[in-house]
Image (cartoon, grey):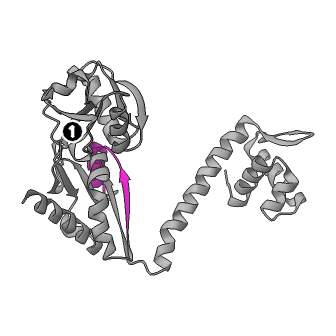
Amino acid sequence: MHYDLPDLRLVAAIADSGSLTRAAGLVHLAPSSASHRLTQLEAALGVALFDRHARGLTPTPAGESLLRHARQVFAQLEQMHADLAPYAAGLHSQVTMFANTNAINCFLPEDLGDFLRERPRLRVSLEEQPSPAIVEAVAAGQVEIGVVAAEGGCAGLETAPYRQDRLVLVVPAGHPLAGRNEVAFAEALGEPFVCLHAGSAIHTFMMNHAARLGARLDVRIQVRGFNAVCRMVAAGVGIGMVPRSSVPAVNRLKTVEIADPWAPRDLQLCVRSRAALNPAAAALFAHLAAKGVRADA
């Protein structure tokens, strides 16, 4: 099959306007030309994309399916334009990074801010991923720099220490666990949890560890960001698991150490080869590694 952008834009315009005539105007085609394009596309696909009725046109199930894919194509094109536009404006280079939830929420905003303020013509593409997926992406050459939990293993990659942190439970001040200094994760699984949104690295981490214990998390509510988790816990919604560095100093919130060996979340940088990094990525790696050295000092 051959698809061109005018056909896809026409399909989207018809779905949005419900009228072939109005859609033709939106995509700068004559109504007859728009009608011919739609007929040709439906003939090529062997299926009707729209139901015709007195009030106009509505997508068929096949039309809805094509429309979903068309909108994804448009979004990718817009992202491509957004990625390329800075180069036309004098952008020197771009660095690609994957990092886990802990790094993105607790350390990278300030550390990247320090780096990028001095380099206005450099861009960093940063995406949140679980540590195992980050290691795979770096090893495959899909991204230049990864920030992962140290216990995840980075065989075959070059690494450097970045930051130290620890996962803790946060509970309301009056909660039965609030008086405990330490608790095993398994002991907390009967409690309702406030979690980050599904798909976040730490949510996946928690669900996997609960499954290994033969249990399932009682997820009462999901939010975006560790600050929101802590505020929900302080309000009595449930308990949460967050990095210690993200816990605010509020009277209604108590932290409890997690006894499990995976609770320390020492973060490290990983790359395929420092020598093979482009100058911008090498400079960013050195900058982040220096932050880790100063934190340990």
- Amino acid under disc 1: Leu
32, 119: nearer the viewer: 119
Q: Residue 127 vs residue 266: left or right?
A: right
Residue 151 falls inside the magenta stretch: no
Number of numbered callouts drawn: 1
Q: Residue 130 vs residue 297: left or right?
A: right
Spot the residue most to the front.
251
Q: Quadrant of the C terminus?
A: bottom left
Q: Position of residue 264 (x, y in %)?
A: 15, 40
Q: Position of residue 260 (x, y in %)?
A: 14, 30
Residue at left offset 79%, top offset 45% = 43
What residue did someone put label 1 on? Answer: 167
Residue at left offset 90%, top offset 41% = 55
Q: Quadrant of residue 73?
A: bottom right
| Up-down relation of residue 90 to residue 177 (above or below) | below
Q: Quadrant of residue 111?
A: bottom left
Residue at left offset 27%, top offset 30% = 171
Q: Quadrant of residue 217?
A: top left
Q: Which contiguous range is marked in magenta? A: 123-141
